[in-house]
């Protein structure tokens, strides 16, 4: 029998359609059909300047806008051959780690809701709301941040921002304890996740899995450790890995521990920013690529010219190409730019983790029950906006 | 497969791009492997011929010193009006050696076709379908090469440079000349025919 699941099924986390080949209640095969949210971001980027593409990225993985902004900006910076100042990098680290916490909160809440644990959802969304308020404080938008820019940030962090982050980061470990108290030893949770949706290490690597999915399968691979960017090599944190063969419980444990590690990194980032000043450099002072400060624009002729050139044309990268990936909450998020020397990219390719991870679904659920499909989809943590782009 | 051993923090890769190239040249002495050079080519990129692609990829994956166990991404690029017009870029990642390398295959305008690497890395399946979907590049040997993100009955290859950015026809468009006129430098431009499915 063929059973159609989605695209409007609540547990498919968006508009994913899965055609299940069933034998009784056992899944023989599964085919995912995607593209319902395809908006042609890669095509549109060819008609926009690099900076104009940043708001597009907010809408890709809409649960982690800051990470998406960062990936695009780092790729553009690599192409330009520039690097943002250290204080900026620390702010970027702080914000992307808060993003990781909030993205994992949404994942945990919805995943638990899918397999019957309703309470967790309310707890998780409470903390996610705090991160969204932090976004609002720093850039004015709750979800579509567009705060990280090529060469730095859109503006400096506001007064009282670090205290607010510190307060959140101090509270967060206790909240993670709460989630764990609800789930980690809950017999229903264990029955629904342990030994379910297993992904062997060999399959995970062959299918290109990254991030928590790969680590859940026992591979210690984290771009923040292995190919550091934004000065991640100066932070002290652990990379959790799964221990029981890459099942849904492993991925759950990896993400929960990642939330703890993220708070640890955020702590260090706050200390770093404080050491470098509550106010200070928030973008590069190379005005060929970065907008000059508004005060200068009003007083200096050169700054006005730079401002005008960047706003009217955008910056001109050299002819060439660059690929840069970051460890986004969902896995390796990379941007590949081909530049022909004009302010618009000749080609922008997005390597999105959700797109790659969705391919692992059939190998997780073959021979399992229909109910496990829900667990599998939830445990790989996809966002359809990013799958379809 | 054993667990990759390199996950040590701060350990730089021991595999230099030169070494990768050298290993390939020793193994494939008769194959032209050209390194991409340029002002701002930030990654190590090698051009390989399409007919040897699968052999080269298998070697890169299986060679114990290189160990490119993961294919990270595949991208098509359209360089209209250049000849060869298309390129397919393969982003390879070695977990054990903590190294990346890009492979490139250049393809002509007529019937762009490249052998599929799904047999080497299963992850190539969707990446190749996406590239086919966007550029009409055929991957011979792919198990089911169909459109993936666009509807099955879509006409045309949207990311080719001679496919204009879609637009919606609005009232009084004729009053704003130039609004729908594509770049005159690109030849062969005709408004894309989009057939919508009747549900």
Image (cartoon, grey):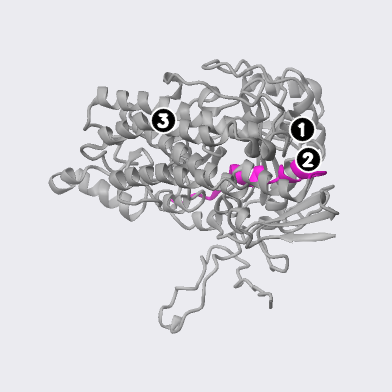
Identify the magenta region. Answer: A343-368
Q: Can you name the residue that lies furthest to the front here?
A: A187
The subunit letter for the residue under badge 3 reads A
Whether residue A168 sits left or right of residue B118 in the image: it is left
Contact between labelled residues 2 and 3, with CB atoms less than 8 Å apart: no
The subunit letter for the residue under badge 2 reads B
x, y (%) of residue B29? Answer: 80, 24
Q: Residue shown at 45%/73% (left/top)?
A: B179
Q: Residue shown at 28%/45% (left/top)?
A: A137
Q: Nearer the viewer, mark 1 or mark 3?
A: 3
Does any portion of residue A326 appear in the rendered image?
A: no
Q: Nearer the viewer, mark 3 or mark 2?
A: 3
Above/below status of A126 relative to B35: below
Indicate which disc, 1 or 2, sits on the residue closer to the N terminus: 1
Closer to the camera in the image, A224 or B166: A224
Q: Secondary structure at mark 2?
A: loop
The subunit letter for the residue under badge 1 reads B
Whether residue A16 sits left or right of residue A337 in the image: it is right
Tell me the number on the disc at residue B117.
2
Residue linked to disc 1: B57
Tell me the number on the disc at residue A174.
3
Q: Secondary structure at mark 1?
A: helix
As measured in the structure, the alpha-carbon distance from the residue carrying label 1 to the one carrying label 3 is 48 Å
x, y (%) of residue A376? Answer: 68, 44
Q: Quadrant of the C terminus of chain A?
A: bottom right
């Amino acid at each position: 029998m063929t059973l159609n699941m989605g695209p409007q099924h609540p547990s498919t986390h968006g508009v994913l359609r899965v055609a299940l080949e069933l034998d009784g209640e056992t899944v023989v095969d599964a085919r995912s059909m995607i593209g319902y949210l395809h908006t042609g971001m890669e095509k549109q980027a060819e008609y926009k300047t690099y900076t104009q593409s940043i708001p597009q990225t907010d809408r890709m993985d809409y649960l982690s806008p800051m990470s998406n902004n960062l990936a695009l900006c780092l790729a553009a910076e690599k192409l330009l051959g520039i690097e943002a100042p250290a204080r900026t990098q620390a702010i970027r680290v702080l914000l992307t780690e808060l993003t990781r916490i909030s993205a994992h909160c949404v994942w945990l809440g919805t995943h638990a809701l899918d397999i019957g644990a309703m309470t967790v959802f309310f707890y998780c969304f409470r903390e996610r709301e705090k991160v969204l308020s932090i976004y609002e404080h720093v850039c004015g938008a709750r979800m579509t941040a567009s705060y990280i820019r090529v060469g730095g940030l859109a503006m400096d962090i506001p007064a009282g921002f670090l205290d607010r982050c510190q307060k959140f980061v101090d509270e967060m470990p206790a909240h993670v304890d709460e989630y764990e108290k609800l789930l980690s030893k809950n017999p229903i949770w264990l029955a629904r996740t342990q030994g379910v949706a297993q992904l062997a290490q060999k399959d995970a690597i062959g299918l290109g899995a990254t991030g928590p999915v790969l680590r859940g399968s026992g591979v210690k691979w984290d771009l923040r450790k292995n190919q550091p960017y934004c000065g991640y090599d100066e932070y002290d944190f652990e990379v959790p890995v799964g221990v029981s063969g890459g099942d849904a419980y492993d991925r759950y444990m990896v993400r929960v521990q990642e939330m703890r590690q993220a708070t640890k990194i955020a702590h260090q980032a706050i200390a770093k920013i404080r050491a470098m000043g509550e106010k200070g450099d928030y973008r590069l002072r190379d005005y060929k690529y970065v907008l000059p400060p508004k005060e200068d624009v009003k007083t200096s002729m050169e700054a006005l010219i730079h401002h005008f050139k960047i706003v009217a044309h955008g910056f001109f990268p050299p002819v060439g190409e660059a690929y840069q990936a970051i460890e986004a909450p969902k896995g390796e998020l990379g941007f590949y730019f081909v530049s022909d020397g004009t302010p618009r990219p000749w080609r922008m390719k997005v390597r999105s983790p959700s797109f790659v991870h969705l391919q692992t679904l059939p190998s997780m659920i073959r021979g399992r029950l229909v109910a496990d499909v829900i667990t599998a989809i939830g445990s790989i943590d996809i966002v359809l906006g990013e799958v379809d782009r | 497969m054993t667990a990759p051993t390199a996950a040590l923090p701060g350990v730089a890769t021991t595999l230099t791009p030169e070494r990768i190239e050298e290993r390939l040249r020793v193994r494939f002495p008769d194959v032209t492997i050209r390194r991409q050079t340029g002002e701002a080519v930030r990654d190590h990129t090698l051009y390989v011929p399409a007919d040897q692609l699968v052999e080269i990829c298998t070697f890169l994956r299986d060679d114990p010193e290189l160990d490119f166990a993961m294919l990270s991404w595949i991208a098509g690029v359209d360089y209209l009006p250049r000849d060869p017009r298309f390129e397919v870029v393969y982003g390879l990642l070695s977990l054990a050696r903590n190294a990346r390398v890009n492979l490139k295959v250049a393809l002509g305008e007529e019937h762009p076709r490249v052998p599929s690497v799904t047999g080497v890395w299963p992850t190539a399946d969707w990446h190749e379908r996406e590239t086919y979907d966007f550029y009409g590049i055929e991957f011979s040997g792919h198990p089911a090469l169909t459109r993936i993100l666009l509807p099955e009955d879509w006409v045309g290859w949207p990311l080719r440079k001679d496919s204009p950015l879609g637009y919606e026809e609005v009232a009084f468009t004729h009053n704003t000349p130039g609004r729908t006129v594509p770049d005159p430098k690109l030849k062969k431009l005709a408004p894309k025919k989009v057939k919508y499915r009747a549900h």
